[in-house]
């Protein structure tokens, strides 16, 4: 057997460079890396040596590098991914939050944190976490609960099995998520005679699991018996590339479609069967349909609490739940009748089996709701006072300036709920990280989306709170000339959670700057801050100016940050929609306001359907 002598790090990058997609691209497009003593000499040397066969990019923060990689994979519909490497210690643990985000959202990313010395001779090395009772533990064990696959490379030959296992997990729709290969720093530099055959190119195929015939027959029977079914469209529809299949299925069988955060834009908002978002941040049209549904058909959804109104939304007595999902864990949630299958394949087979079945629904619900959205998002009359625009009005202004190529993206704060309810995207024109709702994802994520879809316009909505947490990848985007537009809404604090605090009967406390225990209220110049990193930054005078600035940003080769002062009080649900969300209210209350909130909480909790 022919062999080639390489260090373990050299073998890793050479193998990754020849793992291919069906379309002929590398599955791992490249590696984001911040070097330290745990990866610079071993993996760093190997990445330098392989050059553009597996390119390396430098970021500003390990967590945000990973957010970029995750957003890239999400925008690529999980067909391609990126790797992220750090040193040991804080560099590695910085990535744990991103690993959790990828795990919750079922998105592939390869984490390669440096690890301690396998030979233990220099222990304890700089940044080493020592467990007094278990010498095998390192800081990288934090990745175990947030990785779909975890391995610690303590011998160079372990790569022969660990690398294929990691890629198998990342490319399987049912197990898709983050893989972590904690790479002991001395092992990175150790040599081994690897079989030459190990480095032959390999194509990874994305499976399309077929449904079990018995499960399919049962689902067909349930749909045929339904009078008022509704489809809940999740992210699995997009990852399966089943958008058109779902559109055809809905029209043919007369079943209206409502959306989750991950499933939004599988159907364009202009599609006649798209009734908008469901649940806590849902439209009046969608929630009315869900409340009256005798059969709920989930397609590629996890049935997160925002989608289900904490399981109070689907309230028709005797209603049934169907869940079409590649992952049995998700297909069987809450007593659902599971159909374990690829979404596209399942919908195609159901279309044939249902024949001429057609349900009925009230199409007027959709038009009535969209009219309310238009009114709510319209530009207000010119005001003579200093009144600030609402988030809905900001969304309306950006919507008017957008095109069919525009993608709205976000992750946390007020804007996710407002955008889910109010943004009217073209197909594929929406990117939301709301499985983990991680503040700090937005700016790095926008860069990842633009890298994945360079022909699309990426518009990133971010609040001042999220911007303050993680903004440094703007500098990376400037260095690499990656253009996207940032709408930075400044409401001077955490406006979303402040409203939730009030809604739960609490007092305004520690969310808005004005309610914090500080000696001086901050006056942050976001334009100057963003400009210092090299972006084009400016402040919108009003909504008309905002529209003009969004249009002007399209001609630039670097990010644009547009700052808008907004009113933190109004709720996007005022546009016609919204639903209860289970956020606990204290049982022992000291104020009338809190007691009223507790009474309402108990009443809503009694409507929850925990077992279907």
Image (cartoon, rainbow, N blue to C red):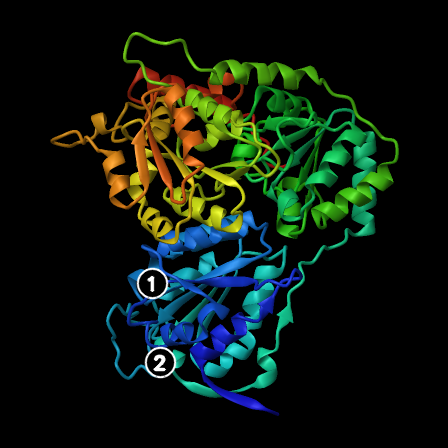
Q: Nearer the viewer, mark 2 or mark 1?
A: 1
Q: Which mark is residue 34?
A: 1
The percent coordinates of residue 473 (x first, y second) are 34, 49
Quarter of the N terminus within the rendering: bottom right
The percent coordinates of residue 9 (x first, y second) are 43, 77
Residue at mark 2 to residue at mark 1: CA–CA distance: 18 Å
Q: Secondary structure at mark 2?
A: helix
Q: Is residue 330 left or right of residue 225?
A: left
Residue 357 or 444: which is nearer the viewer?
A: 444
Q: Is residue 352 left or right of residue 28?
A: right
Quarter of the C terminus within the rendering: top right
**In percent of the image, x 21 and y 33: which residue is there?**
524
Give the vertical position of 379 relative to 9 (above or below). above
Q: Residue furthest left?
A: 519
Q: Is residue 561 left or right of residue 426?
A: left
Kindly identify which residue carries mark 2.
Answer: 186
Which picture quadrant has residue 299?
top right
**In percent of the image, x 48 and y 20: which residue is there?**
573
Residue 95 or 238: which is nearer the viewer?
A: 238
The percent coordinates of residue 530 (x first, y second) are 28, 40
**In percent of the image, x 48 and y 52: which residue is there?**
70
């Amino acid at each position: 057997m022919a062999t080639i002598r390489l260090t373990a790090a050299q073998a890793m990058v050479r193998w990754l460079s020849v793992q291919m997609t069906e379309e002929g691209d590398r599955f791992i497009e490249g590696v984001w890396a911040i070097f330290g003593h745990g990866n610079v000499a071993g993996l760093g040397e190997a990445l330098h040596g392989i050059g553009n066969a597996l390119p390396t990019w430098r970021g500003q923060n390990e967590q945000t590098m990973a957010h970029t990689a995750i957003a890239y994979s999400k925008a690529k519909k999980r067909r391609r991914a990126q790797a992220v490497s750090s040193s040991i210690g804080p560099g590695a643990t910085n990535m744990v939050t991103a690993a959790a985000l990828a795990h919750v959202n079922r998105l592939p990313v390869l984490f390669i944190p440096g690890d301690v010395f396998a030979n233990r001779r220099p222990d304890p090395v700089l940044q080493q976490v020592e467990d007094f009772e278990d010498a095998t533990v390192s800081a990288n064990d934090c990745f175990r609960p947030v990785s779909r696959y975890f391995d610690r490379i303590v011998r160079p030959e372990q790569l022969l099995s660990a690398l294929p296992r990691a890629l198998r997990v990342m490319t399987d729709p049912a197990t898709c998520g983050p893989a972590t290969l904690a790479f002991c720093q001395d092992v990175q530099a150790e040599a081994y005679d690897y079989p030459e055959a190990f480095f032959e190119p390999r194509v990874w195929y994305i499976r399309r699991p077929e449904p079990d015939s018995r499960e399919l027959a049962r689902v067909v029977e349930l749909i045929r018996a339904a009078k008022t079914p509704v489809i809940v469209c999740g992210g699995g529809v997009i990852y399966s590339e089943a958008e058109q299949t779902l559109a055809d299925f809905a029209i043919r069988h007369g079943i209206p479609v409502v959306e989750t955060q991950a499933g939004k834009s599988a159907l364009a908002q202009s599609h006649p069967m798209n009734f908008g978002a469901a649940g806590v941040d849902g439209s009046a049209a969608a929630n009315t349909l869900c409340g009256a549904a005798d059969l709920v058909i989930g397609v590629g959804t996890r049935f997160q609490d925002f989608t289900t109104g904490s399981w109070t939304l689907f309230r028709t007595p005797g209603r049934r739940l169907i869940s079409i999902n590649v992952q049995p864990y998700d297909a069987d949630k809450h007593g659902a009748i599971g159909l374990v299958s690829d979404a596209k394949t399942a919908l195609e087979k159901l279309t044939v089996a249902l024949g001429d079945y057609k349900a009925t629904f009230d199409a007027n619900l959709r038009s009535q709701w969209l009219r309310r959205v238009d009114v709510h998002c319209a530009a207000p009359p010119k005001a003579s006072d200093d009144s600030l625009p609402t988030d809905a009005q900001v969304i309306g202004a950006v919507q008017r300036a957008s095109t069919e190529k525009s993608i709205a993206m976000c992750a946390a704060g007020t804007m996710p709920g407002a955008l889910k309810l109010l943004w009217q995207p073209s197909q594929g024109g929406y990117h939301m990280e709301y499985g983990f709702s991680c503040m700090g994802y937005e700016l790095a994520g926008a860069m990842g989306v633009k890298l994945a879809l360079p022909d699309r316009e990426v518009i990133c909505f971010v609040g001042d709170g999220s911007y303050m947490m993680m903004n440094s990848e703007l500098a990376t985007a400037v260095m690499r000339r990656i253009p996207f537009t940032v709408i930075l809404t400044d409401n001077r604090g955490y406006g979303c959670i402040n409203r939730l605090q009030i809604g739960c009967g609490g007092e305004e406390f520690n969310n808005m700057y004005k309610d914090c225990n500080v000696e001086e209220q901050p006056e942050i110049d976001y334009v100057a801050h963003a400009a210092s990193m090299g972006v084009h930054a400016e402040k919108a005078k009003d909504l008309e100016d905002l529209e003009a600035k969004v249009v002007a940003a399209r001609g630039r080769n670097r990010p644009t940050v547009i700052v808008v002062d907004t009113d933190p009080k109004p709720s996007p649900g005022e546009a016609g929609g919204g639903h209860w969300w289970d956020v606990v209210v204290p049982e022992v209350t000291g104020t009338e306001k809190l007691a009223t909130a507790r009474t309402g909480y108990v009443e809503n909790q009694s409507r929850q359907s925990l077992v279907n």
